Image (spheres, rainbow, N blue to C red):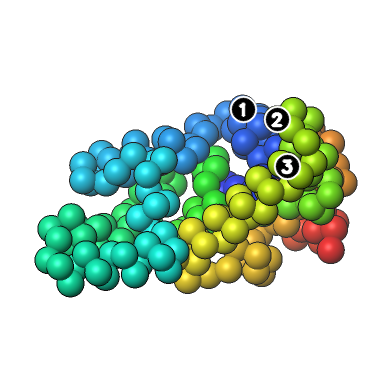
Amino acid sequence: MTVWTIAAQEGTGGARLAAELALAADVPLLDRTALGALAHQLDPACPEDNELERHLGGRLNTLALSTAITAGSPEAFREIELRHKLPALGRAVVAEAARRPCVIYAPAAFAALVEHPAAVHVRLWAPLEWRISAYQREQLVDRRCAEKALKRDDHGKRAWVKSLYHVDIDDLRLFSLVVDASRFSPDRLVEAMLAAGGVEAARLATELAGL
């Protein structure tokens, strides 16, 4: 009963590859929107997916929140409560999703599902210059805009995973399969992820790491 988690750098085509993997494996695809809906079912107080990350904001948000707590703001206390329960809620959501074979496309899913015996944790990455070119083609933006967007997304995902589970998304030892998306066609990447759910995982991990 294989469960794939995919943590992809922006510009690697991660969303498309996750969808193609789910189709090829004939399993459901759970992206962050679907996981957010599941989280809301488990805890109706949980905000929608596009609001979750602001609840784990940076130092400025933390300082502002501390000031609000000092002033006795009820909203600030609710915010603190949500921040404290998000890691456990995230684990509960991913564990519920992983009760059956599926593809989970979310940057922190690998960290929430560390002990699942049949999980294949995939990290899709590529050199920055290659990702910039891919992003420009997909979004029809200039190079400066593409580079800025990619670096912002990299930083956001890194901070999100670190805030939730205190691990580094760039630590490749945490993944079952690390794939340089610039080196292989989309079809080959999907084949590799499919095979990683079986006996060829170790061989493919070495072949496709590209490091």
Q: Earlier in the sequence, mark 3 or mark 2?
A: 2
Q: Position of residue 55 (x, y in %)?
A: 35, 55
Q: Amino acid at mark 2?
A: Gln
The Cα–Cα distance between marks 2 and 1, rounded to whole angstroms, is 25 Å
Residue drawn 42% across the image and 35% down it: 34
Q: From this viewpoint, is residue 101 visible? A: no
Image: 126 above or below 41: below
Q: Which residue is mark 3?
A: 146
Kindly state the secondary structure of the residue where label 3 is placed.
Answer: helix
122 left or right of 64 in image: right
> Which mark lies nearer to you, 2 or 1?
2
Q: Which residue is mark 2?
A: 139
The Cα–Cα distance between marks 3 and 2, rounded to whole angstroms, is 8 Å
Q: Which residue is mark 1?
A: 23
Circle 2: is it few (<14), some (14-19), or many (20+) Cα within 10 Å?
few
Q: Position of residue 174 (x, y in %)?
A: 61, 66
Kindly state the secondary structure of the residue where label 2 is placed.
Answer: helix
Q: Earlier in the sequence, mark 1 or mark 3?
A: 1
| Cβ–Cβ under 8 Å for marks 1 and 3 | no
Q: Amino acid at mark 3?
A: Ala
Kindly state the secondary structure of the residue where label 1 is placed.
Answer: helix
> Which mark lies nearer to you, 1 or 3?
3
For residue 172, what is the image quadrant?
Answer: bottom right
